[in-house]
Amino acid sequence: MNKTALGLVCLGAFLTSALVLASPAAPAQGTVRAFNVRGHGFAFSPGRIEVQKDDIVKITFTAVDIPHSFSMDGPYRVAKRASAGQTVTFEFRASGSERFYCNLTQDERCKGMHGELVVK
Ligand SMILES: [Cu+2]
């Protein structure tokens, strides 16, 4: 990776952190809950998302280093892929707790990427 690319990655990480800090923190039940989730270093950050049943969960997912996906089975059936440095946004209604993971096969370590949607 050359210096320019490294600089861009660092800038991206900084901007994403700023977005995370700017996320609303005091939602009401059944309302839109927005989360910025990063896929980076074969981990999701945050790795745990907690919402209330029937909340509209809006995920802004950024793959920081290499392509990653935000995938969930169960009732959600979500598989959103983002290229390196790219962001995808999607939303769903929270119905039950579910694990999320990266379903890409480019690197074995993606199999170790998972997080948890906790619906109360
Ligand atoms: Cu991945």
Image (cartoon, grey):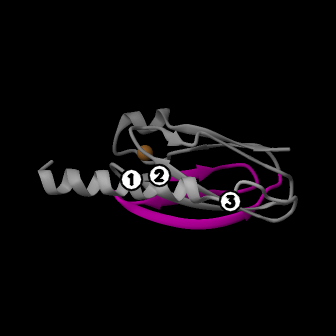
User: Dot 1: few (<14), some (14–19), or many (≥20) neighbours within 10 Å?
Assistant: few
Majority secondary structure in the magenta region: strand
Q: CB under 8 Å between callouts 3 and 2?
A: no
CA gap, disc 2 and disc 1: 5 Å
Quarter of the image with the C terminus in it: top right
Q: Which sits in the foreground, 35 or 75?
A: 35
> Mark 2 Cα within 10 Å, few/some/many (few <14, many 20+)?
some
Instruction: Label 1: state its secondary structure.
Output: helix
The front one of 48 and 101 is: 48
Q: Is residue 15 magenta?
A: no
Q: Indicate which disc residue 14 carries.
A: 1
Task: Check disc 2 and report the residue beneath it.
Answer: 17
| Left or right of residue 27: residue 110 | left
How many numbered callouts? Answer: 3
Residue numbers of the magenta segment: 69-95
Instruction: Decide: few, some or many residues near mark 3? Use Cα within 10 Å; few <14, some 14-19, many ≥20.
Output: few
Alpha-carbon span between mark 1 and mark 3: 18 Å
Q: Amino acid at mark 2?
A: Ser
Report which residue position mark 3 lands on: 24
Answer with the quadrant where ligand 1 appears in the image.
top left
**Disc 2 vs disc 1: Cβ atoms closer than 8 Å?**
yes
Residue located at (40% from left, 44% from top): 105
Asked if labels 3 and 1 touch by Cβ distance under 8 angstroms, the answer is no
In the rendered image, the residue lying farthest to the left is 2
Asked whether, in this view, residue 102 is left or right of residue 29, the answer is left
Q: Secondary structure at mark 2?
A: helix
